[in-house]
Image (spheres, grey):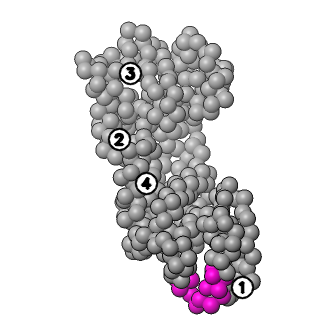
Amino acid sequence: MGSVIHLRRHRSKFWSVRFYDASGKQLERSTKETDKKKAFKIAMAFVEVAQTAKTAKHTREVITELHERITGEALPSQSWRAFTASWVARKSLEVKPGTMAFYLNVIGKFTGFLGARADLQMTEITTEDIVGFRNHGSKVVSAKTVNHDLKALRMIFQAALQERVISESPCEFVKATKGGPKNKKAPFTIPQLQALIAVADAEWQSMIRFGLYSGQRISDVATLTWRNVDLQTFQVRLVQRKTNKPVIIPIKDTPLLPYLMAQAGDDPNAPVHPRAFAAFSRNRRSGTLSNQFSALLAQAGLCEKAPHRKTEGGAGRSGARTVRELGFHSLRHTMITMGAELGVPKEVIMALAGHDSEAMSQHYTNVGLDSLEKAVGALPQI
């Protein structure tokens, strides 16, 4: 016989039942009841079903029926694809475009993982599906990315739970992963940077130099407008998209200045890098630009070119993502590394890059403009 227990997990106020199914596997289910007597009645029904049902699908169907019979509330029937479409429509009014783009990316990945099953009812998605998705991701991306995706799925299934589309979340007892390939970017060497500049056109040369001499992320470099550029004080001012932190970048003694002086126009809303701005604006994500940068790396002989078609193992641009040591983010690491080698104080370099640690950012608030200018001026020409 199963026993009703009060779980403190996730600060739950509901009673849950822990029991064994016919195969001897231990299960745990929330009764969604705060009253112990009612919870015990539901728990006993769950135990009976688990010990007599022949398949997992049969178990879910009977438990759903029991939920409706005992609580008097019918569970709405919706597929994963339909529910996430309505969830996105609501959520898009509540979060920033960048956050919404992240949610859409996770939904797209999980929908692709489910395949045709994405059109089945939400109640058909199991803990095994979530674990399988997590384990698959662990083979191709960093543990940090996998756990971010898992966190987004938890949020979506929690919303389905609150709307009574499902009676329990399949994510509830799925733990975060600690494995997966590392996704740390290596810094560039001067010869590598020179090779990269040699194959880049004027706009990408400017993007690369901005990444190197400012340490900014590709999305911030791509979305710069001339309003961000002050050619009288020789400064670029922006608010980072990821951290929402203001950053001041001195440009007087950098190779950025000649390009900016030559390209500056009268429209403050015009983008500094028009093609990159348009590419980012199409879907509010930097994937296209990252692919273009990877192509430049390959052209410069700094990495292998990604195949357009799938190989026998399913690789290629539509397959598993290759974890590369070099990428646009490597320019950020290069600035920090070179600054350290030249003796530039760490707090100055991190203030320039707009470090995303709150504690470190508070430490950097006393860094002056003179220190920033000296730091940028100390970086080598490429």
Q: In this view, does 209 lie above or below 306?
A: above
Residue at horizontal 33 percent and vertical 16 percent from the top: 261
Residue holding disc 4? 105
Sequence order check, earlier mark of 4 and 2: 4
The magenta stretch is: 45-59
Q: Do the residues labelled 2 and 3 touch (CB within 8 Å)?
A: no
- Would you call the spot at circle 2 few (<14 residues within 10 Å), some (14-19), or many (20 or more)? some
- Relative to residue 104, is residue 154 drawn left or right? right
Q: How far apart are marks 2 and 3 (CA)?
A: 17 Å
In-front residue for pair 382/251: 251
Residue holding disc 2? 280
Q: Distance between the residues labelled 2 and 1?
A: 53 Å
Sequence order check, earlier mark of 2 and 1: 1
Q: Please check the rendered image and state whether residue 49 is part of the magenta-colored stretch, yes or no.
A: yes
Residue at horizontal 62 percent and vertical 33 percent from the top: 357
Sequence order check, earlier mark of 2 and 3: 3
Q: In the rendered image, is residue 295 in sight?
A: no
Point out the residue furthest to the left here: 266
Q: How far apart are marks 4 and 1 (CA)?
A: 38 Å
Label number found at residue 228: 3
Sequence order check, earlier mark of 3 and 1: 1
Q: Do the residues labelled 2 and 1 touch (CB within 8 Å)?
A: no
